[in-house]
Image: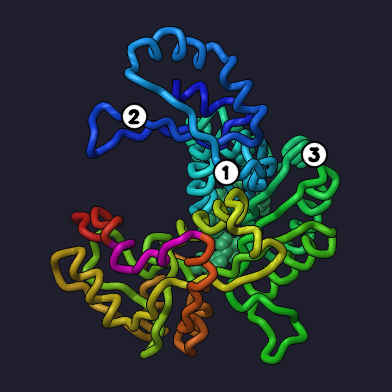
Amino acid sequence: VIAPSRCEPGCLFFDVLLSEQDPLLVRFYEAYRHRSDFEVHLQTQHARTWTDECLPVVDSASIQMPESTSDHGGTHLHDRKVVVFGATGRIGREMVKRLAEDLRCKEVRAVSRQPESAAGLHLQAFEPSVQVLPFDDLEAVCREATDAFIVAPASDDALSWHEQVADALRAAKVEHVVKVSVIGARSPASIPPPGRFPSLHWAGEEALRSAGLKTTVIRPNIFMQHFEMGTGVYTAGDDRFYLPIGDAGVAFLDCRDIAATGHALLLSPSATAFHGGCFDLTGPEALTGPQIAAALSAVRGATVVHVDGIAAFEARCALLGKPDWPKAVYSEAAAGWFSALSTASFEAVVGRRPRSFAAWADDRASFFSATK
Ligand SMILES: NC(=O)c1ccc[n+]([C@@H]2O[C@H](COP(=O)([O-])OP(=O)(O)OC[C@H]3O[C@@H](n4cnc5c(N)ncnc54)[C@H](OP(=O)(O)O)[C@@H]3O)[C@@H](O)[C@H]2O)c1
């Protein structure tokens, strides 16, 4: 009875609780948008089967209704159709998975420029609630959508990209947009002026806001995933990493925590206080190179060395044939741009601390311990 009940449009959640004290006591814990939705539930085939076939063997049964009859904002839920831009990426994949498992979300539109790519096909495994749709048909992607989660390319055309997406979202009357921006995003008129990525994301934020969309902005710090993004920082199984950050601490963030934030912002009634605002999001601690080395050594079970300095990073990138542009970001890190902590909003929205570097590295133990 659980699965079909959870699929009823008026059902917010449906759980069966077993008592630890009394093995014969079973509670059904259910919530509906309105009392009338509960009446509809009682008339469904699965509920009637329960009543007709199971209830006769129950010693005694009763229904307890809550004191309050207000709908607790429930009309907002269970009918959400969420568009996810950047769905095949690191953050997007995690977001699609979360939404697909969330009964409050009726439909997930995972947007990709190539729905038939391996990454697109991977998301199709979450059908039927997930559809993978092509980026080049924005009108179809946004039609009747209620919410959008945006992971945008931080490329030189970021402004026109956001304008194009904002037009489609506005035409579809999308109610709420959550955009992943970057820490330090601010107006070019600010002193000091923003660097390249904060500047591009600021333009994107402004495009969404000026289109009149209710936009909530997450401004994340530099990702832990830099260690596995093929940037020249680290190669699987290596005994050293190349990170020119000097003595600065860096509050690396697990980018899966961005998806956790976006998920809560879109679907959790308790997060509505944050709607329309912006907040920074960092990891829970600012670690120096030696502290990162200690965390990776613990995971690897063998010493991992921190190699500092721009020249060493450039040489490493040259050896691997990788572009060395991330050195500009690491220079900002060395200047302390990514040292400050900002986790309060995350904790309020998600209800836990962001994942630590050690916990993230532990999750990736096979990557760090790989045989070279
Ligand atoms: N790296 C960091 O430390 C850091 C820190 C703060 C903020 N950020 C921001 O986080 C975002 C990156 O997130 P991520 O790592 O999850 O991304 P990602 O793994 O690089 O994936 C992004 C996805 O976006 C899609 N995409 C790329 N260019 C596109 C375009 N022109 N139009 C439409 N879709 C496009 C791609 O999917 P398809 O190929 O399937 O279309 C790709 O899978 C960027 O905006 C970046 O500035 C990064």
Was residue 254 drawn as part of the magenta stretch in this picture? no
Please indicate, yes or no, whether residue 95 appears anywhere in the rendered image: yes
Taking 140 as reference, is 130 left or right? left
Badge nearest the viewer, 3 or 1: 1
Indicate whether 214 appears above or below 189: above
- In the visual, does 177 lie left or right of 224? right
Mark 2 closeness class: few <14, some 14–19, many ≥20 residues within 10 Å: few
Q: Nearer the viewer, residue 245 or 14?
A: 14
Compared to residue 350, the image places residue 53 above or below, namely: above
Sequence-wise, which precedes: disc 2 or disc 3? Answer: 2
Mark 3 and mark 1: Cα distance apart in space: 44 Å
User: Which residue is denoted by mark 2 in the rendering?
Assistant: 26
Q: Give residue 101's position: percent from left, percent from top.
A: 49, 38
Q: Which mark is residue 139?
A: 3
> For residue 192, what is the image quadrant?
bottom right
Q: Residue drawn 24% across and 57% down?
A: 365
In which quadrant of the rendered image does the N terminus lie?
Answer: top left
Q: Quadrant of ligand 1?
A: bottom right
Q: Which mark is residue 202?
A: none
Point out the frontmost of discs 2 and 1.
1
Quadrant location of the C terminus in the rendered image? bottom left
Image spot of residue 297 (x, y percent): 19, 70
Q: Nearer the viewer, mark 2 or mark 3?
A: 2
The residue labelled by disc 1 is: 67
